[in-house]
Image (cartoon, helix red, strand yellow):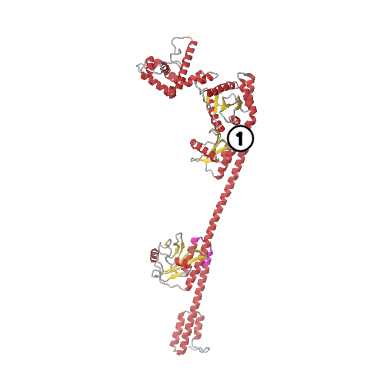
């Protein structure tokens, strides 16, 4: 084995094996062959030295290749970490890579929670369900000291290492997984701490500096990647929120454009002279709702759609809150109430029931719609004031017509029709007298009210006179007093008359209404309202037509009808009762019936007339009505020729007559 070139036995063979990157066994074979060939000891020593050096070169080459492989894996890992991942996916990539590169049996990443504990977020290679989610309290294990030192810590056998502050729960997890060697590397990016990277083996293992350095490099890369992924997720969430805000903004802009167009359309209708109902329908369509415009007394002035059944008590309470806060208010049932105001003046409310919930823009349109109606009501008031002299002149002429007819009456009817007033329809006349306050304000209000109600207004002898369409004078008087009194801050007395038809009835109703107003003053009823009907027998005296039949019907009409329909004698019983001074026993003697029969008949009268007929005022009304009824029947019987014992002589069973003997049956039992 002596090389003639180098004079060194086997050295060339060692170099050849080294250049061929031969396995270690080939070097052993070379040594064995030299020993068999009995190479001199000096040459054998040189050969053994050469083989040893060759093995060192091979080991160095292996380490270099291992470093190159580790560096390549580190580059691949860095490439993986730079790929788009969410945080959870990225944590899984890190644990999987570290486990493969360092040949760990298990890897895990723990992050700090709000309590300061390290909670395992992900793991790879675990064999039990105890690892993921397990929390190591502060001051225990390897993780917390590594974070405090910002340096890696490791142990060859965790459970037998007394230098570690053990946590019983963590030890149970280590024992359940069968782990021995454990490494903890902090994951930090600048000053920010992400968590701890753990690597573990199920055998006792001493980690080399290269392994520790590689894990530290991976932990640093992972920390940067995790921080970047967290920022990316945060940015993506922010972008999502911005996109949502942009969508909401675009939607709001579109809705605002729609509402602006709707408001312009509604306002255009007002300026074009449309009536309240047309504007209400347009506003209801714009808000996709049914709505009503109500005056301060709660009467509906215009409607757009059907609101259905409303909780009027809740609406009234909401109206008070709306005017108090000057903004729309919603009830518990979802009904909106918006104030319609002009300065401090209450013009009414808008009551709205939407098909879908109102959003902020819709609420704004509701407020604008209420302002639109306020403008329309003010325009109508201005129109009424502008037309006031013409309408007042017409009303003054109507008051002076009295019984004149013919051409003059026809001319006034035509003039009224030109102003949109039909005098041939039923009308009532009101005379209002404010009991204090400024009359000018009341006159302006009356002009607007009359115009709104399609009626007339004038001032006569210091009183405000209104001619309004309708059939119930008492209700019309109460409505005027209810609206005008709060406006003036003082009570208002209102006398009323009607209904009447035609121009000729206006003067008569005016005189009757004035007499009712004077009667209120004389009876110390200032601040009240009354018509001839409300004043009872006094109204009968005050009325121009002296409607006796109407008065009798209002006082005892139900009793007369009962007698006529059932052939009873309640009227006769009442007459006997009053004639006997209110004694039921004396009345029974006169009627020749049992006192209980009289009691039952009077109870029936109470059922028909109510309890008020027995009060002093009611008793007077009933007695006067009985006397008028008896007198009228007596006069009628005198005008008719006698035809025997008919039933129209006032004692039979004709209309309104009495039939005292019809109160008992053939068996003598009383009939109630």
Q: Is residue 116 visible?
A: yes
Q: Say few, some or many: other residues with alpha carbon within 10 Å of mark 1 (under 14 / 14 to 19 / 20 or more).
A: some
* Left or right of 238, for residue 627: left
Residue 608 in percent (x, y) is at 43, 23
Nearer-the-camera pick, 37 or 155:
155
Nearer-the-camera pick, 454 or 277:
454
Residue 214 in percent (x, y) is at 49, 70
Label count reads 1
Decide: is 167 above or below 385: below
Identified at 52% across, 88% down, the residue is 6
Quadrant of the snapshot with the C terminus:
top left
SS state under label 1: helix
Residue bounds of the magenta highlight: 77-88
Secondary structure mostly seen in magenta is: helix
- 84 part of magenta stretch: yes
- 82 part of magenta stretch: yes
- The residue under label 1 is 378
Q: Is residue 472 visible?
A: no
Residue 591 in percent (x, y) is at 38, 15
Decide: is 509 above or below 149: above
Residue 24 in percent (x, y) is at 46, 80
């Amino acid at each position: 084995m002596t090389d003639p070139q180098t004079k060194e036995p086997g050295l060339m063979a060692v170099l050849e094996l080294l250049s061929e990157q031969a396995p270690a066994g080939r070097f052993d074979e070379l040594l064995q062959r030299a020993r068999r060939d009995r190479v001199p000891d000096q040459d054998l020593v040189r050969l053994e030295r050469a083989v040893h050096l060759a093995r060192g070169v091979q080991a160095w080459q292996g380490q270099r290749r291992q470093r190159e492989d580790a560096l390549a894996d580190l580059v691949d890992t860095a490439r993986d970490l730079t790929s788009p991942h969410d945080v959870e996916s990225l944590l899984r990539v890190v644990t999987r890579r570290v486990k493969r590169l360092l040949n760990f049996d298990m890897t895990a990443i723990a992050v700090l929670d709000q309590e300061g504990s390290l909670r395992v977020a992900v793991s790879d290679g675990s064999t039990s369900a105890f690892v993921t989610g397990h929390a190591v309290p502060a001051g225990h294990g390897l993780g917390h000291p590594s974070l405090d030192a910002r340096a890696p810590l490791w142990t060859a056998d965790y459970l037998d290492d007394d230098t570690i502050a053990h946590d019983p729960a963590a030890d149970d997890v280590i024992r359940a997984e069968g782990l021995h060697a454990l490494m903890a590397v902090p994951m930090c990016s600048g000053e920010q701490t992400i968590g701890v990277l753990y690597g573990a083996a199920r055998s006792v293992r001493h980690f080399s500096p290269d392994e520790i350095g590689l894990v530290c490099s991976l932990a640093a890369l992972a920390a940067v990647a995790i921080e970047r992924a967290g920022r990316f997720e945060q940015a993506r969430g922010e972008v999502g929120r911005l996109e949502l805000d942009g969508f909401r903004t675009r939607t709001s802009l579109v809705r605002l454009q729609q509402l602006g167009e709707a408001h312009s359309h509604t306002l255009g209708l007002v300026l074009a002279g449309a009536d309240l109902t047309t504007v209400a329908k347009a506003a209801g369509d714009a808000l996709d709702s049914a709505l009503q415009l109500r005056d301060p007394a709660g009467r509906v002035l215009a409607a757009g759609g059907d609101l259905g059944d409303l909780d009027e008590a809740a609406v009234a309470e909401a109206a008070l809150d709306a005017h108090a806060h000057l903004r729309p208010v919603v009830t518990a049932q979802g009904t909106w109430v918006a104030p319609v105001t002009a300065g401090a003046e209450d013009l009414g409310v808008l009551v709205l029931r939407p098909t879908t919930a109102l959003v902020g823009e819709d609420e704004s349109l509701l407020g604008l719609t209420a302002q639109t109606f306020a403008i329309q009501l003010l325009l109508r008031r201005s129109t009424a004031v502008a037309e006031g002299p013409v309408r007042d002149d017409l009303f003054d002429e109507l008051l002076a017509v009295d019984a004149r007819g013919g051409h003059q009456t026809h001319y006034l009817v035509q003039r009224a029709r030109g102003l949109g007033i039909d005098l041939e329809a039923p009308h009532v006349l009101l005379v209002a007298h404010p009991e204090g306050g400024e009359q000018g304000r009341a006159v302006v209000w009356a002009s607007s009210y009359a115009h709104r109600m399609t009626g007339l207004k004038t001032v006569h002898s210091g009183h405000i006179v209104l001619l309004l369409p309708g059939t119930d004078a008492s209700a019309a008087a109460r409505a005027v007093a209810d609206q005008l009194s709060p406006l003036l801050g003082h009570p208002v007395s209102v006398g009323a008359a009607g209904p009447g038809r035609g121009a000729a009835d206006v003067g008569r109703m005016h005189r009757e209404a004035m007499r009712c107003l004077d009667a209120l003053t004389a009876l110390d009823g200032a601040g009240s309202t009354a018509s001839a009907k409300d004043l009872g027998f006094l109204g009968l005296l005050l009325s121009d037509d002296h409607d006796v039949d109407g008065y009798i019907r209002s006082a005892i009409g139900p009793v007369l009808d009962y007698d006529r329909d059932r052939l009873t004698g309640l009227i006769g019983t009442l007459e006997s009762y009053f004639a006997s001074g209110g004694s039921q026993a004396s009345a029974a003697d006169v009627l020749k019936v049992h006192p209980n029969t009289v009691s039952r008949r009077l109870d029936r009268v109470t059922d028909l007339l109510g309890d008020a007929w027995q009060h002093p005022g009611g008793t007077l009304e009933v007695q006067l009505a009985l006397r008028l009824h008896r007198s009228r029947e007596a006069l009628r019987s005198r005008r008719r020729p006698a035809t025997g014992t008919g039933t129209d002589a006032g004692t039979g069973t004709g209309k309104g007559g009495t039939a005292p003997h019809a109160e008992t049956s053939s068996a003598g039992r009383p009939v109630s």
